Image (tube, rainbow, N blue to C red):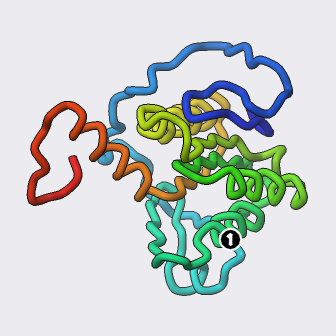
């Protein structure tokens, strides 16, 4: 699974052949009880001084990064994937999912990771802008299911990066509109 590129539904798109799973998992898994989680103590070094010093990324923590239109959020995501580390004696992997991206951006992600020689520790899920919206909704679920497998079955420390959550939210909104739901004050389902 590491070093492979999948579409939003978990089908390989890297031309390296089929993946034969050891086990199948439901992508609609139950949430983990936050009280039963181990208290986070160690941090993930991103190699970006403003994050490492001012908004330290602790294991088990969510760190949203917001950017305005036209800002270089894709470059920041690539830089985090290329430079992220934990202590040397621990097994570390990255699950990267991009939703609703254009073909040139998807190619940018792939070539950047390959040129930096980090694909051996990355699992990529790429949902393109011309893919069906249901696939965009399923992309983070497939990515998080892969992360759970790597963490709980293979005992790796995992960094999950989900990029362009706006595309995901817009897909949810479009899906709810197609079901005839009335848009509410909250805007997104």
Q: Relative to residue 49, is residue 174 drawn left or right?
A: left
Asked whether the viewer can see residue 148, the reply is: no
Depth check, front residue: 93 or 82 = 82
Q: Mark 1 — residue?
A: 75
* Vertical relation: 7 (above or below) 170: above
Residue plotted at (83% across, 44% down): 120
Residue plotted at (41% across, 49% down): 168
Q: How many marks?
A: 1
Secondary-structure class at tag 1 = helix
Indicate the position of residue 186 as horizontal and vertical percent values.
Answer: 14, 58
Depth check, front residue: 155 or 78 = 78
Q: Relative to residue 45, is residue 143 drawn left or right?
A: left
Indicate the position of residue 106 as horizontal and vertical percent values.
Answer: 69, 51
Indicate the position of residue 50 as horizontal and vertical percent values.
Answer: 59, 86
Asked whether the viewer can see residue 81, the reply is: yes
Depth check, front residue: 139 or 105 = 105
Indicate the position of residue 26 as horizontal and vertical percent values.
Answer: 45, 20
Q: Quadrant of the N terminus?
A: top right
Residue plotted at (55% across, 42% down): 130
Neighbor class of circle 1 (other Cα within 10 Å; few <14, some 14-19, many 20+) is some
* Vertical relation: 182 (above or below) 107: above
* Vertical relation: 158 (above or below) 76: above
Q: Relative to residue 175, is residue 44 drawn left or right?
A: right
Depth check, front residue: 35 or 184 = 184
């Amino acid at each position: 699974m590491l070093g492979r590129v999948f579409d939003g539904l978990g089908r390989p798109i890297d031309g390296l052949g089929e993946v034969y799973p050891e086990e199948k998992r439901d992508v609609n898994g139950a949430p983990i009880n936050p009280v039963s989680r181990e208290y986070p103590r160690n941090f993930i070094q991103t190699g970006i001084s403003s994050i490492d010093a001012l908004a330290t990324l602790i294991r088990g923590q969510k760190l949203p990064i917001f950017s305005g239109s036209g800002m270089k959020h894709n470059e920041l995501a690539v830089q985090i994937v290329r430079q992220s580390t934990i202590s040397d004696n621990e097994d570390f992997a990255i699950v990267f999912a991009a939703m609703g991206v254009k073909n040139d951006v998807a190619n940018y992600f792939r070539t950047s990771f390959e040129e930096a020689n980090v694909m051996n520790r990355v699992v990529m899920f790429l949902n393109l802008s011309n893919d069906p919206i249901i696939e965009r909704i399923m992309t983070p679920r497939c990515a998080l299911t892969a992360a759970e497998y790597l963490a709980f079955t293979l005992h790796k420390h995992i960094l999950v990066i989900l990029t362009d959550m706006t595309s995901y939210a817009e897909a949810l909104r479009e899906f709810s509109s197609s079901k005839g739901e009335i848009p509410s004050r909250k805007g997104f389902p």
